[in-house]
Image (tube, helix red, strand yellow):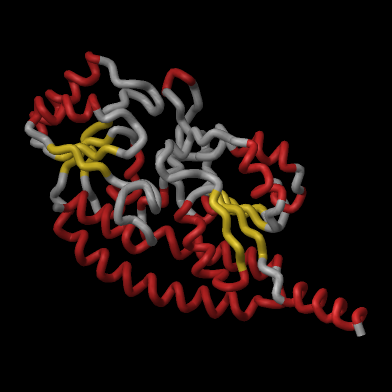
Amino acid sequence: MKKIVLITMFLSAALFAKVNVAVTYNYLGEITKEVGADNVKVVVLASPKFDPHFIVPKPSLLPKVHNADMLVINGAGLEIGWLPPLLRSANNSHVISGAVGFVDVSRTVDLLDKPLSVSRAFGDVHPQGNPHFSSDPHNIIPIAMLIAKKLQAIDSKNSAKYQSNLESFISKWNSYLAQFDADMQECKTKKVVQYHKLYRYILGRYNIESVGTIEPLPGVSPSSKHTIELIDKMRENDVNIILQDVYHEQKTAKFIASKSNATVRVIPHDIGSVEGTDSLENLYNTIKDRLCH
């Protein structure tokens, strides 16, 4: 009898086992939860409070990668500064590049700002293009579709559930996008300056003009000369909005604002990066409200 109970417990555990999914950023975790629902267990590697380029690969992250059945990354070089050492140390063949459990969502997006050549003279450029495509909510559905496809490959017995979850999410997200697009119409005449080209995709989507960046080159701190030139350019073009992220220094943006009659608006880059962004919808609602009003 004891043997039968043990076998039954083992089979039950196997039947209801969840797919362990590690994701690099919160927004990817929320999409994975939408598609995977009760069949996945999601862990997030990076804190939204820090620069997504430079997360510290702490030893505490190793078990999360080692135990993962699937790893979902932003890609386009965004994790290149911190994820490779984690993957080497985690020793998990299921989630290395090329494995069925490795999911690079940048492959679903038409990347912007692809450099013609890569040189340190141009700053910290990404060879594949700008990796900050998650600022555009229209990129969420193709990402969800890829995640669903990978879950179906890893956990085929629950394929129908993943497909049903995906279809429900797509329907819900398309309704959200229709309202979001309508609300964003009032932003079309806006002109902005960014600290970093972090919001390139959403600005391009809604034809909002980015006049310049506080960084003279990607990853290069602003010089006095560049700052003064940017102030003059903002005055000439009647720019009164500065888009600031949560992780770069804000002193320069505040100085520029004081000299150009502009306001500094802290725009979230991920779920949880600022207060009130605890879901995908609230993330984009906050971006919209801070950008347009």
State which quarter of the image contains the N terminus. bottom right
Q: Image height check: is 7 above or below 276?
A: below
Residue 97 in view of the camera? no
Q: Position of residue 225 (x, y in %)?
A: 22, 14
Q: Residue at x 71, y 53 (%)?
A: 67
Above/below status of 11 relative to 79: below
Name the residue nearer the viewer: 172 or 271. 271
- Quadrant of the rendered image containing residue 4: bottom right
Give the image location of residue 286, x and y in percent: 26, 55
- The residue at 24%/40% (across/down) is 243
Q: Residue at x 14, y 30 (%)?
A: 257
Q: Does 15 appear above or below 145?
A: below
Q: Position of residue 214 (x, y in %)?
A: 27, 28
Q: Tell which of 228 and 64 is nearer to you.
A: 64
In this view, the residue farthest toward the bottom is: 1
Residue 192 can be seen, yes or no: yes
Name the residue rendered at 77%, 73% in the picture.
Answer: 14
